[in-house]
Amino acid sequence: MRKCFLLQMTSFVKKGSFLALALLLKILKIFCQFYFIKFYFKKPKRCPTITNPLLLKTASQLSEEIRNRKISSESVVRAYISRVKNVNPILNAVMEDRFEIAIQEAKLVDISLMATNLNLNEVKNNSPLLGVPITIKESIAVENLSNTGGATGLKGVKATEDADVVKLLRISGAIVLLVSTTPEYCVSLETYNKISGTTYNPYDTRRTAGGSSGGEAALISSGASLIGIGSDLIGSVRLPACFCGIWGHKFSREIVSTRGHIPTSEDATFKSMFTFGPLTRYYTDLPLLFNIIVEKNSKSAISLNSPVDLKNVKVCFLKDYSVFRFCRKPEPEILFAINKIVKHLECTCMCKPELIKLPKTGGYSFLYMEKLGSIKGVEDILENYSGNYFKELLLHLIGKSHITFTHTCLGILNCVYRCLGSTDNSDEHVNTIRNQLQDTLGSNGVLLLPTHPTAANFHGGVTSKLYDYGYTAIINILGLPATQCPVGLNSAGLPLGVQVISATCNDRLTLRVAEEIDKLFGGWIPPPFSE
């Protein structure tokens, strides 16, 4: 009797929590539409056409031609610098550059390649990115460059040394051009901060480039960068890559060093969810970056370079997306793309398709909030405004708030969620979902899932639809690898994306299936350029 009563009370509290959250989201949506309405009526700006053919080569092609002295590293670096200067006034994606130093480094590469006794195979193995320019998200430390995570309280702070990942890239011969924009403390899916302002999507500047690696994605998609590194806690590599029509990858948990990031935490939940990840314009550069930045002791664990026989790969997909409560249902064009991939893999590659259902244990939307809210030790811009989030919301309407609008909304949601409390054991639910999905995928299965239910929102739209990140966030919570794949444009000319997900440490499976998706859809489609 008592147990039955407790179950009924638990169900009642959960229903009340869902209703309260649904009402709050509707209120925030109204505020967001009012606050960001200016973007709806602006005429989109376009980046200039790419005219230099060097900007259309893959990193692999550039490194080979530089090694063989068919082109100079200096010419490549100068080409990208010129392109950045042309597009950044439109996209606003650069926090700080090191152009002059990069040119000097490129000259040294060219001089070193003039030696007559060079073993080019040895150079390729030791320095696979020799002379190739790269860009880095500003929250990742690059020595002597801005390293604020977009937080006004850290304005002017410079990194004193490179992050581990940046060190590995320099050893590989890559030349860092700049650090790109990120939202405050990277806690937003919209790239905006009060130091540099808003970053714009090259396909439609009225729309978001995503976050928190939005600066990287915008530069790469517009031809102002070729390859870059971002960070991902709830989808911060994959969502910008999706919105900007490029490739992005979230690694299996803890196989890449994340030392040198702002913000950071020693919290176990943070470490299990957070990772760095590559963003590339061309698929072929993903495996190249993988081999460079994955920790040495992890390479054997993920067997990255082991061949994958697609005939043995099981391709799982969903028909029911109701477990992603509060997330919008994927648009028909995205579902069509997933079905097209399944048919291609089945008919052309002899893969085995399987329709599956995700476990409905717990509320997925609440799991995201509970896991994020439980992280300790991460710098929080709202810590000095505890209990005043609603006041900050009103201050935004008159332009008086000193914190970003997105952080205010997140603070309100977190505050309300904490007041509602949780009646569930989130760790138990996460383990249930992880175990069932790991068992379903096994050592040879992948799951196709939308990266986001729609194409890029208008600026501010992400804030009013915060739970749409659920399709990416659940992968971080489970610690699984996922590759974001561009799958063409929608009827409005905006990029769409699909994730390929596998069991832990099977990153090579997601890469191999992504390669087939590249063949099917053609990868990156340039945004509309001006004449």
Image: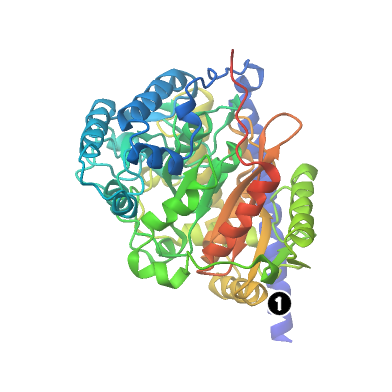
* Residue 179 higher or lower than 309, as above or below: above
Query: x%, y% of residue 342?
Result: 76, 57
Query: What residue sits 63% from the left and 47% below the top?
Result: 518
Q: Which residue in the rendered view is the most extreme toward the bottom? A: 1
Where is residue 166? Give x, y as percent.
30, 48
Q: Nearer the viewer, residue 186 or 402?
A: 186
Q: Is residue 444 above or below residue 382?
A: below
Residue to which mark 1 is pinned: 7
The three-letter amino acid code for the residue at tag 1 is Leu
Location of residue 18 by image quarter: bottom right
> Can the viewer see residue 409 in this picture?
yes
Q: Is residue 51 left or right of residue 166?
A: right
Q: Secondary structure at mark 1?
A: helix
- Along the line of sight, the residue nearer the viewer: 206 or 495: 495
Q: Is residue 347 left or right of residue 151?
A: right
Q: Nearer the viewer, residue 283 or 453?
A: 283
Q: Looking at the picture, how far across and down is residue 272, in whole percent?
A: 44, 65
Residue 102 picture quarter: top left
Residue 195 appearing in the image? no
The mark tally for this picture is 1
**Mark 1 burial class by Cα count in 10 Å: few <14, some 14-19, many 20+:** few
Which x, y percent locates residue 332?
80, 44
